[in-house]
Every structure is written in structure tokens, then in C-alpha cells.
Image (cartoon, helix red, strand yellow):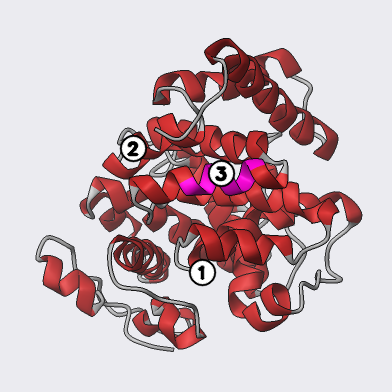
């Protein structure tokens, strides 16, 4: 399917490692670097920070995927720290695919999670879901000793990848895959929300208009996904982030946007590097500094207790994060355009 070496963008960067081409049957699974070109998928692209952010994210994902296929996953640590989570997202997708194809019950994914990706678990679970989607299989099956709640992020990753490959149907026709149970659909929509941020190139007006075309019962989770992507991946300028909060508030889902943002900054802080775009986004989208917003997710998880593991528990976790934002929002007396 293509060379497992670095992409043109990586070559220009000058500091990225080079991968050894995969051998044997693994070469069939290797991704062509051109798969990361969102323009080939007819996504709306505009020049500037958004196009650069999305290109780097997807190309880093492809690099991580191919690093596993080439048996050189350690090279993910050699890419720039800001891009490393996307590299491990790709690595987890490849590990998941190999585990499913060889019936090894999640061994490779488990080794990745407890080894190189131990500080990037959020990204790895998102990547695992992308691996399931690539094989058209229902997510969250077969991973041994998975985190009881973070494993639901695999459904989010599934939603992103499934929608990425079928944007005309998932975005244009607003369909839902038959592979999912009702319990999975809300988390799937978070992944779709992340994809919408990419699809409309971080333009707040276009993203809001796109979400408005979905049924009211799906929009909350879509806004949550947008909040995650706007913080985790970036792509918007400061004034655009403020417009995003205005649109979410007008739609009645301001707390969901903040919840997605809090979850994203918690993931970024655990990875060890907080990019400038995330530090810029959190005070606007969550109305708090990054450490405080991340603490909402930790406190909510503690309150759920050690037995939390179901879909309902995951949704309760998110709801408590929203409650934390609401309390903070009331104390501050609300937010307004600066």
C-alpha cells in the first residue's frame, strides 16, 4: 500500500527519523503517506494554522502506524513531542489491527499501553478504535486489561476513522453505522464531532452550521468532540475560538464544548507536553487554566469509584466534568467576548 518512510512534510522538517520499509506480509498493511492528505478526501481546506495542524496530526498518525508495521515503534519517541500523541495513536491502530488479524487477544496493544505509550493512553485508545474501524469491526473487544473507562475512547476513535473514510455519508447524510449498539452511538458522535472540526477546517461558522443539520439528540456529543479536537489538535486562532464558544452557547451546548476541552487538556498534560495552541484554547473554551480544567476530569473519575466501567459510568464521568465547568462558570459570573 505504500512506502513506510517519512512523508514529504516530515522530510522538510529535518528532525524526523526514517523508517525501514516493512517486510513480508506486513508490507501489505503499510500506509501510503498520501492517505494523510485530507484534500484528497474533498475536505474543506484553507491556508493557515488549521491546514498545518491537521496535516501534521494525520501525517504523524501515519508515521506511528508504519513504525509498528516496520517493527520500529521506538522511533515514535524521536518525533517532535507535540506530535508524539498522534504518533502513538497510529501505533495503537496498527497494533490493534495486527492483534485482530492474528487473534492474539490484544497482546500488542497491551504491550504498547504498558510500555512506550504509557503516558499517551488517551491517544492509544483513540487509535485502537481507528484500528477496529479499518477492519470494519465493532470496537472494544479483545483488548486485555484495558482501562475500564478510557477503553470507551476506542468508540470515539472508531467514530473518527469510520467517518473519515465515509465522509459523504456520515457528514453529508448524517447516518449511523449498523455496527454499533445504542450505547455506542453517543461516544461515536464524539469521534464524528472531532472529524467535523477537520472536515470544515476549524471554521467556527461552518462547524456550527454542520452540527445544526444533525438531529437535536446528537448535537451535544458532536460539540463535545469539537471541543476535544479544537484543544487537542488545534487549528483555530483566538478570535475563532471565541466565536466557537458563542456558537456552542447559542445551540445550548456550551458545557459540552468545555467538557471536551477539559478532557483534551488532561490528555495533553499527561503526555508531558502542553502545546501553545492548547494553552491558548483552554481559558477560552473551558474558562479556566489548563491545570484546573484537567483537574475536573480527575476529581470526577475519583468520585465514580474503582468499579466504574460501563457506558453509563463513562457518560456519568462526562456529566460530572460538565457540572464542574458549570460551577466554575457561575462563580466567574459567566464569560463574554473580550
Disc on the earlier residue, 3 or 2: 3
Circle 3 SS class = helix
The N terminus lies in quadrant: bottom left
User: Looking at the rendering, which quadrant does residue 131 occupy?
Assistant: bottom right
164 vs 145: above or below? below
At mark 1, the secondary structure is loop
Which x, y percent locates residue 228? 53, 45
Q: Which mark is residue 200?
A: 1
Specify the quadrant that holds the C terminus.
top left
Q: CA distance from mark 1 to mark 3?
A: 17 Å
Question: Label 2 belongs to which residue?
Answer: 280
Is disc 1 in contact with disc 2, using a CB cutoff of under 8 Å?
no
140 to the left or right of 98: right
Q: Which residues are magenta?
A: 243-249
The answer to whether residue 144 is visible is no
Q: Is residue 32 magenta?
A: no
Q: Which residue is mark 3?
A: 246
**Disc 1 residue crowd, few under 14, some 14–19, many 20+, Cα 10 Å:** some
Amino acid at each position: 500500500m505504500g512506502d513506510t518512510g517519512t512523508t514529504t512534510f516530515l522530510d522538510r522538517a529535518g528532525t524526523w527519523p526514517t523508517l525501514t520499509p516493512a517486510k513480508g506480509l506486513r508490507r501489505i498493511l503499510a500506509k501510503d503517506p498520501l492517505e494523510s492528505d485530507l484534500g484528497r478526501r474533498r475536505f474543506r481546506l484553507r491556508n493557515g494554522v488549521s491546514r498545518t495542524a491537521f496535516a501534521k496530526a494525520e501525517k504523524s498518525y501515519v508515521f506511528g502506524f508504519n513504525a509498528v508495521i516496520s517493527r520500529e515503534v521506538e522511533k515514535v519517541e524521536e518525533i517532535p513531542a507535540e506530535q508524539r500523541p498522534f504518533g502513538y495513536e497510529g501505533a495503537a491502530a496498527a497494533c490493534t489491527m495486527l492483534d485482530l488479524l492474528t487473534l492474539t487477544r490484544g497482546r500488542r496493544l497491551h504491550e504498547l499501553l504498558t510500555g512506550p505509550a504509557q503516558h499517551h493512553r488517551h491517544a492509544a485508545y483513540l487509535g485502537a478504535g481507528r484500528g477496529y474501524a479499518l477492519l470494519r469491526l465493532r470496537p472494544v473487544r479483545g483488548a486485555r486489561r484495558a482501562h475500564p473507562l478510557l477503553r470507551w475512547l476506542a468508540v470515539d476513535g472508531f467514530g473518527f476513522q469510520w467517518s473519515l473514510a465515509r465522509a459523504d455519508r456520515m457528514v453529508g447524510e448524517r447516518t449511523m453505522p449498523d455496527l454499533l449498539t445504542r450505547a455506542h452511538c453517543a461516544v461515536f458522535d464524539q469521534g464524528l464531532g472531532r472529524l467535523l472540526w477537520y472536515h470544515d477546517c476549524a471554521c467556527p461558522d461552518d462547524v456550527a452550521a454542520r452540527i445544526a443539520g444533525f438531529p437535536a439528540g446528537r448535537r451535544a456529543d458532536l460539540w463535545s468532540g469539537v471541543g476535544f479536537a479544537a484543544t487537542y489538535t488545534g487549528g483555530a486562532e483566538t478570535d475563532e475560538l471565541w466565536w466557537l464558544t458563542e456558537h456552542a452557547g447559542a445551540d445550548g451546548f456550551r458545557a459540552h464544548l468545555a467538557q471536551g476541552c477539559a478532557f483534551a487538556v488532561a490528555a495533553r498534560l499527561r503526555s508531558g507536553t502542553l502545546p501553545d495552541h492548547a494553552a491558548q484554547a483552554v481559558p477560552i473554551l473551558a474558562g479556566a487554566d489548563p491545570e484546573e480544567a484537567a483537574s475536573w476530569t480527575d476529581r470526577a473519575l475519583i468520585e465514580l469509584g474503582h468499579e466504574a466501567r460501563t457506558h453509563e459510568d463513562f457518560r456519568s464521568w462526562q456529566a460530572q466534568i460538565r457540572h464542574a465547568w458549570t460551577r466554575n462558570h457561575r462563580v466567574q459570573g459567566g464569560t463574554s467576548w473580550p
